[in-house]
Amino acid sequence: MTRAISLHDVSKSYTRGTRVVDRVSLDIEPGEFLVLLGPSGCGKSTVLRMIAGLEEIDEGRLLLDGAYANDLPPSGRDMAMVFQNFALYPSMTSRHNIGFPLRFEAPGMDPRPRVDATARMLGIEEVLDRFPAQLSGGERQRVAMGRAIARHPSAFLMDEPLSNLDAKLRNHLRAEISTLTRELGVTTVYVTHDQSEAMSLGDRVAVLRGGVLQQVGTPRSVYALPRNVFVAAFIGTPRINLLRGMMRAPLGAAMTISLGKQYLRLPEPLSLDHQLLRVQQGREVIVGLRSEAVRIAKPSAARPGEMALTGLVEHVEFQGHEALVHFNTGSSPAVVPDLEAPRPAARSTRRRREGGPGVLDRLRDRAGALRAGPVAVLDEPRSTAPVTPPEGRLPGDLIVRTAPDIDLRHGMQVPLLVDLAHLFVFDHHGERICPAPARAPDLEE
Ligand code: ADP
């Protein structure tokens, strides 16, 4: 049996007045693989633990197969959890670790056939008589998975099950989990902060920020049509280029988005999406360009819908199959709060050393105060001083994906073409306004 899991306006506070999960609503279909994705501390595990019955629900309703389940004890929910720290009993062999829950779930039943079948499925027959200390990390995690699978639960709840493993093993087990859960057809809720894991595993991905659900959709739809700047920045590698822009829409003249020292002229006749931008005249916006939306080419090579910019090469990242070129185009990157885990200790030390909060500290603090509020910070005065790049980014405001054999060096001025069919525009709160939200109903969920 597999089950439907529904959350209706579910909230949770550990300290009064601070919701770590804030009115989350989510319908998970029977057999679906749903990934809860977001930065560390955004409330993912708390949601999972509320589904498991390990954490009380303060407000809202949990429905299991349509039946009210807020007060159902964990043992009555028929769900199996897999944790990041494997949680195996050190004094038991793999066989006994896998069979242990069956003692309570099916007393009197001989656990051996189920344990053997599960071990075959996971390819761990050889290690059934070993103790956890005699197993590799990957084997231990397979045993932990085996313990969940052998129970034949109606749902798997997985909390960062691969994060203690090295990258190669993680990729391998990721594929195994995907195959296994699909074969078993059991509803799976999987928590991770790793967007590439989420994108490769999930039938759908639910993105959380500060306890608030930002968007739920297929991996394709959250990448192609992020609802706001936070989702746009959280999903995709390299991170989407987010530039501060100013809409200029004079009557009777071309509509442009000014990007500091350069501007993008919107092609005429204006598309419906671009026409809708007219109301933003004179306002600050955020321009989002994925690295594949820009190419290195002369203006004379422009195809319809491509507009020219120039960029100064800051840095070239060789990746083997491609290169990522970091350009300075004279624009300012937009700041998106909450993208990374907050680091309070480091923040207070730095503040003490410098004798006062810096701009980034102030932006982060403000972002903290607005956890469920705007998803971008634009109202700091624009300055001509060098802009500190957002965390995790190297200098330069525009990253472009190119072929790996390109010969570019620091300081070269290079012509660029921007494909405006792949242009995102977000308003000053960080909500997407282009493409307009209702324009692609098949992708928008
Ligand atoms: P995530 O899984 O996204 O990393 P969690 O759900 O574990 O986030 O935590 C969300 C927030 O709730 C964090 O700020 C965390 O510190 C806080 N939190 C989690 N568990 C407890 C608890 N038992 N008591 C108090 N605060 C908690």
Image: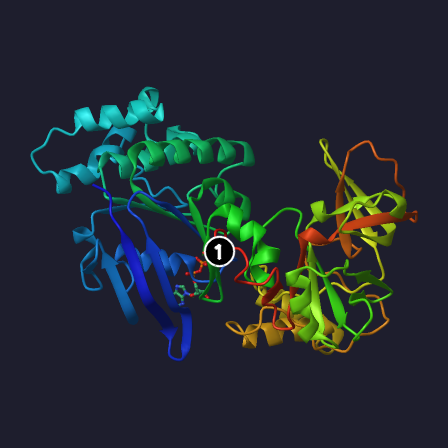
Is residue 276 or residue 162 the one in the foreground? 276
Image coords of residue 410 (percent x, y):
89, 46
Q: Quadrant of ligand 1?
A: bottom left
Q: Secondary structure at mark 1?
A: loop
Image coords of residue 9 (percent x, y):
34, 69
User: In the image, is residue 388 above or below residue 204?
Assistant: below
> Can residue 57 be seen from the camera position used here?
no
User: In the image, is residue 276 above or below residue 445?
Assistant: below
Residue visible at 21% across and 53% down? 65
- 372 left or right of 85 in image: right
Is residue 444 or residue 41 the one in the foreground? 444
Is residue 155 or residue 444 the one in the foreground? 444
Residue of label 1 = 441
- 197 left or right of 380 in image: left
Res 437 → quadrant: bottom right
Image quarter in which the C terminus is found: bottom left
Q: Is disc 1 surrounded by few (<14), some (14 to 19) or many (20+) residues within 10 Å?
A: few
Image coords of residue 174 (percent x, y):
46, 36
User: Which scheme is used to colour this image of the protein?
Assistant: rainbow
